[in-house]
Image (tube, helix red, strand yellow):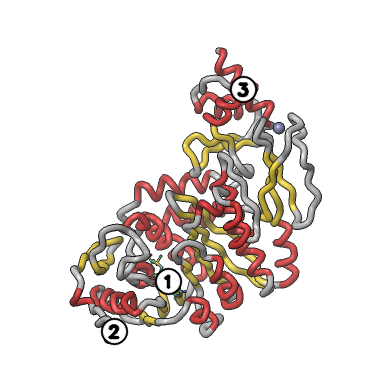
Amino acid sequence: MGETEKTHNDYNLVTITEGTTKIQFPEFDKVSSDAPVFYNPHMELNRDISILALQTFQKEQNRPIAICDLFGGSGIRGIRYKNEIDSTDTISINDISETANEFEKINVELNNLQDINIYNHEASAFLRSHRGEFDVIDIDPFGTPSPFLDAAGYCARKNSLLCVTATDTSALCGTYKEPCIRKYNAKPYKSEYCHETGIRILTGYVALTLAKYKKYIEVKLSHSTEHYMRLYLEVKKGSKATDESLNNIGYISHCKHCLYRETNNGLATSIQDTCPECGEKLIHAGPLWLGKIQDEEFIGEMIKESENKKLNSKKELLKLLNSCHGEANAPITFYDMHHLCRVLKISAPKLDLVFDQLKKEGFIAIKSHYNPLAIKTDAPIKKIKSIIISLNCS
Ligand SMILES: C[S@@+](CC[C@H](N)C(=O)[O-])C[C@H]1O[C@@H](n2cnc3c(N)ncnc32)[C@H](O)[C@@H]1O
Ligand SMILES: [Zn+2]
């Protein structure tokens, strides 16, 4: 005889509150995909940001939005979306696990909600059988979203919002090259700005996947936080506009010796292999997205929207959103102050002084959410180094 199926009565239950929503799930020792139902408290910030992004998108669309929470787990996303976002239509929560489905139903009842449907399907199969039904598709899987993006590309409606989480950051950041090539068909490299490269590889892969279906993306918000990356993309339609949008695909080239870097647009473009500054070999990452990865106006609206919501992570969330807002028009990649100083073999001057001097000399100088020591600037590497050296001597 096989094992007897467990029901919720067989577990010690834990109840938590995020936003204004209560969620119950079986107690677990550590956050893991082996838990009977997955709940990760470290993702609360991610979910809080999602509430603001979806509400902002709903207000832009000015109609009730139908939402698909494709990997429901405890149901926390879909249930929070129904409970905490104004003007939602039906919410569809899907999960391949029946135990997850059981808790999703319990949690819908716990919050006295209507108009939420629970489904038990493989994610891509579910999307394909509900093509064009959703205004928002939220992809929050274990690890890589890559296997589900083709179905999302096929099924996403015109002017819909596609939200994508990736937790396989070691692949996207280039710690391991082969998994990135396998999953994202792109070559990464490890550098001080590899989290930005990772976001751009993921975005580029989504753009190329959607292009098959004459769909293209506009990035509303992207961030790399702790162990994951998250994208909010508006999906648009049209073959000509898709062709034009693919001009945003290209490569970043980097010199490890002197920290020179450059970008080249185009899928099959010719790229120099030698650093024009020092003559060492350049390494290349891509294909990846060289277009905008933050939308100033959208993020500005999200920041305003935060005043209307009860969110536990508000302080941290506002710090992150304000930083992303500031990065909207920043140059691609950044310099890490300590890394620069290690290459120069000098001690680091005060970061603010470097920012002041760059601005005084007419260059852009912007901080970044990726790293507290980041400098996003259009100043050439020689100029940045000479500023640091002169500040170090003064
Ligand atoms: C990372 S968890 C989801 C977490 C949830 N969105 C949250 O915010 O707490 C991933 C979920 O996807 C489910 N899952 C895994 N593979 C799947 C597949 N191919 N199709 C549908 N669901 C799947 C798992 O059972 C698990 O509950
Ligand atoms: Zn060089």
Q: Position of residue 267 (x, y in %)?
A: 75, 57
| Residue marked by disc 3 | 387
Label 2 SS: loop
The quadrant in which the C terminus is found is top right
**Which residue position holds label 2?**
2
Secondary element under disc 1, as helix, strand or loop, is loop
Q: Residue tagged by mark 1?
A: 71
Name which residue lies at 47% across and 69% down: 138
- Name the amino acid, label 3: Ile
* Nearer to the camera, 83 or 168: 168
Name the amino acid type tagged 2.
Answer: Gly
Give the spatial CA distance, label 3 vs label 2.
71 Å
297 or 244: nearer the viewer: 244
Q: Height in image: 332 above or below 298? A: above
**Few, some or many residues within 10 Å of mark 1 (<14, 14–19, 20+):** many
Q: Name the one closer to the observer, 223 or 84.
A: 223
Residue 354: which quarter of the image?
Answer: top right
Above or below: residue 372 compared with residue 177: above
- Residue 150 vs 329, above or below: the answer is below
Q: Closer to the observer: label 1 or label 2?
A: 2
